[in-house]
Amino acid sequence: MELDETTLSGSEIETLARKIDRPIVLVGMMGVGKSSIGRKLSGLLHLPFVDADEAIETAAQMSIAEMFERFGEPYFRDGERRVIARLVDGERKIIATGGGAFVNEETRKLILERAVAVWLHTDIDVLVDRVTRKDNRPLLRGGDPREILKRLHDEREPLYSQAPIHVQSSSGPQGKTVNKVLKGLAEWL
Ligand code: S3P
């Protein structure tokens, strides 16, 4: 489902907030803006916000980069799977996931069953621009970010697209994207 851009009014957002009965989970590639859009949605809908990557770091008491470096990707993925299973507990909240979370079959199934998944997607150029501003993503180290992002995107797209709501994230101000997510939820719920 793709959406037009008319803005939801304050009372429409309040009506939507009352209809939300499950966690809202943002999925999609690294750099698409899941965390910042999640924080904005949380403010508008008056729901708690949880960043799954931060929750994994808190549980492991180390950064994701350190987890990859010291114990490898499978260790991180195992923590990611367990933390997301704990977060998707039926409580109303907004959850931003790391780009690989929805790729795991068990996690994807859980999210699809117990939450409303929203896939945020955008062009590779926008992703490259955003991710190259920071050097905190282990999967992008040791290679050309554009090539890695393109490969991951192609591998993951069929899985991300299983989310019931698809939102094209605009490259400009995030308010537009936030509004599209709200509309997607209002039509879905
Ligand atoms: C990853 C994305 C990252 C983080 C980890 C792996 C991925 O999260 O979970 O570096 O596999 O795409 P963001 O999507 O928040 O950057």
Image (cartoon, rainbow, N blue to C red):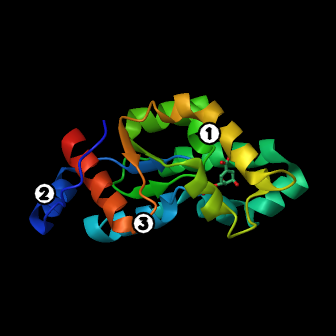
Give the SS element for disc 3: loop
Decide if ligand 1 comes within 8 Å of the CB at mark 2: no
Q: Are marks 1 and 3 in contact (CB under 8 Å)?
A: no
**Label 3, on which residue?**
172
Q: Nearer the viewer, mark 2 or mark 3?
A: 3
Name the N-terminal-most of marks 2 and 1: 2
Q: Which mark is residue 15?
A: 2
Give amino acid for label 3.
Gly
Could you tell me how far apart the alpha carbons at marks 2 and 1 are, in whole angstroms?
A: 35 Å
Q: Nearer the viewer, mark 2 or mark 1?
A: 1
Q: Are marks 2 and 3 in contact (CB under 8 Å)?
A: no
Could you tell me how far apart the alpha carbons at marks 1 and 3 are, in whole angstroms?
A: 21 Å
Name the N-terminal-most of marks 2 and 3: 2
Q: Nearer the viewer, mark 1 or mark 3?
A: 3
Q: Answer yes or no: is residue 17 visible.
A: yes
Up-down relation of residue 180 to residue 37 (above or below) = above
- Which quarter of the picture shows residue 48? bottom left
Name the N-terminal-most of marks 1 and 3: 1
Looking at the rendered image, the quarter that the C terminus falls into is top left
Pick out the residue farthest to the front: 125
Up-down relation of residue 51 to residue 25 (above or below) = below
Q: Which mark is residue 153?
A: 1
Residue 126 coordinates in the image, percent (x, y) = 56, 57
Give amino acid for label 1.
His
Question: Which class describes the residues within 10 Å of circle 3: few (<14), some (14-19), or many (20+)?
Answer: few
Residue drawn at (42%, 68%), measured in percent from left and top?
39
Q: Viewed as shown, does residue 52 lie left or right of 67?
A: left
Q: Are marks 2 and 1 in contact (CB under 8 Å)?
A: no
